[in-house]
Structure formats: structure tokens, C-alpha cells
Image: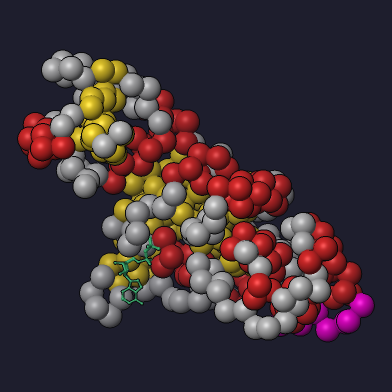
Amino acid sequence: MSTLKIENLNKTYSNGVKALDNVSIEISNGMFGLLGPNGAGKSSLMRTLATLQEADSGTAYLDDINILENPEELRRVLGYLPQEFGVYPRITAEQLLDHMCVLKGFTQKKERKEMVHYLLNKVNLFEKKNKSVQGFSGGMKQRVGIAQALIGNPKLIIVDEPTAGLDPGERNRFYNLLAEVGQDVIVILSTHIVDDVRELCTNMAIMNLGNIVFKGAPQTAIDELKGKVYQKIILRGELEEYGANYPIISNKMVGGQPLIHVFSENNPGNGFEHVAPNLEDVFFSKINTGNVIV
Ligand code: ADP
């Protein structure tokens, strides 16, 4: 059992953007979802934990490894699937993984071969081991990405926006693979897609504008909203008026008309009906301050 403990991390870029604003979280084994809209600061946090960039202040420990002071030690137990794992040379899946093993410091050819075959089997690509990775589908490339992140039995695996660009079938296969991997290690899944977290994560944090605005179990957050979410289908032209009068959590098009969800302690009347809250309501209620999102 490992614990990742992040305390008071701050990062301001040279252009003045504060991407991490006193971020503190504690994460242990299992799948942890870091959910936030684009620009929330997720990648900044992931890159800091993956030792690819420095923080201005704060601490981060994986068990007794001081991540910010001993990055090399952390890298030995880290698996990282970056947002852009997109540059594929014209080599086979087996050659690519073998090369990654060399980079991770595995010098014995026989040991590498065993490891690469194990990983190819694990991500269900063994049959394709002699095919060029360039010709793989998005989902297959992501599975190669996961395989390379698993080299050397990491204690901490970071996956940054992994399902963007996958079709529903590929996404499902990827979920299953991550869920299996995530049983014995810490997996942090950074994403703006609510479904990713709902399907996979027992614990999560929601990030917005560099701040952690929620941490806990997805179900706890949903329970907190119980009895406080109402919905109504309105006309398109009414959106602004409703936005001015009700704390709108979200709006989406249903059959060409906006279906709005509003937050209210009591039934707002006026044709609104009560609806059971879901994780999307949680997400939008935490990141919106009652503004209409169009
Ligand atoms: P997310 O991964 O949640 O989309 P990021 O961590 O990429 O968020 O970005 C957080 C904020 O920091 C954004 O406003 C982004 O424009 C800004 N940002 C990210 N990287 C840099 C950088 N290298 N220099 C300046 N600003 C940056």
C-alpha cells in the first residue's frame, strides 16, 4: 500500500497564470480521478508529480520519496502516460516497448524480452507485436501507452486525458484495462470527461482555476446534491432569462431544445421537476458559480 501526499503546491507561470493554488491532496492505492475543465491546472499538477516541471512551493511525497527533491528516485517507480503520447516511429510494437525498457534502465536482453511479451499480453496486443505502431488505431496506441507506463512495476501511474479521441468501444476496453491495473497501485486519471471518473474511480478531486474544489468519493458528492437538482426543458430564446433568474448548473440540448438543470433547496415551481443528481451535476455545480454555460 502506497500513499501520495501533496501539500500546499503552488505554481505560477511566467505569464502570471496561477495554475496551482495551494493544492493539497492525499491519494492511496486504486483509481483516483482528477476531474476539471480545460485550463483547470490538471496537467500542471500531473507534470509536477511526473517530475517534468518544478513547483514554486509546497511538498509532494510518495511514501518516503520526496518527489520535488529526489526526482530520479521517483522516476524509478513512476509510470506516465502523457497527454501527447503521439510520436510513433516506424517500428513494431515489440521494438518500441523494448526500446522504452532500455530507457528505463533494463540492460539485459532476455529480461527485456520477457517483460515486453508480458506487457503485450497484458494490454492484449501480443498478436500485433510485429506490426508497425504507426498503423495502430487510437485505442491500440493508448494500449501501447499503458504498456510502456507499466514497465518496471511502477507504484504510481499517471494518465493524462487518456480517452480523448477514442471511440466508445475503444474507450470501454481502455477502462477495463485501467481498472485491472489500478487494483494494486496508485493510478491518477486526469480528465475533463465525467464518464471516465464515474466508470472507474472510487475517489476523486475536482479542480478549477488551480484550486481543488472537491475531494472525496463520487457517490458522497452526488448524495450531497440529493433533492436539490431540478430540471426543465425550455425554449432556446429563454436561456438568458432563466440564467438570470435561476442558478443553472448545466444545460444541454435534447431534441434541439435546452434541458437545464438548476440548483435549488426547494422546488422552484414554474414547471421545473425534481431530478436525481448525477456526477455531471456535481461537476458543473462545483465549477460554475450559477452562470449559464453555452
Ligand atoms: P488542464 O490540464 O486542466 O487543461 P493546464 O495545467 O494545462 O490545465 O493549464 C492551467 C493553466 O495554466 C491554463 O490557464 C494554461 O493556459 C496555463 N498554462 C499551462 N502551461 C503553461 C505554460 N507552460 N506557460 C504559461 N501558462 C501555462
Q: Position of residue 141 (x, y in %)?
A: 63, 66
Taking 62 as reference, is 291 left or right? left
Q: Is residue 4 above or below residue 256?
A: below
Q: How many marks?
A: 0
Taking 294 as reference, is 222 left or right? right
Seen from the viewer's position, the closer of residues 154 and 38 is 38
Seen from the viewer's position, the closer of residues 65 and 243 is 243
Residue drawn at x 65%, y 83% as measured from the top left:
89
Residue drawn at x 10%, y 34% as measured from the top left:
238
Q: Position of residue 181 (x, y in %)?
A: 70, 52
Seen from the viewer's position, the closer of residues 134 and 68 is 134
Q: Is residue 287 magenta?
A: no
Residue drawn at x 49%, y 58% as measured from the top left:
164
**Is residue 260 something that shows in the picture?**
yes
Q: Position of residue 239 (x, y in %)?
A: 14, 37
What sort of colour scheme is used for the picture?
secondary structure
Q: Is residue 112 above or below residue 122?
A: below
| Quadrant of the rendered image containing residue 74 | bottom right
Q: Position of residue 201 (x, y in %)?
A: 55, 42
Taking 49 as reference, is 132 left or right? right
Q: Is residue 157 above or below residue 205?
A: below
**Is residue 3 something that shows in the picture?**
no
Q: Which residues are magenta?
A: 102-110
Q: Regarding ligand 1, which quadrant of the image does it lie in? A: bottom left
Q: Residue furthest right?
A: 110
Seen from the viewer's position, the closer of residues 286 and 88 is 88
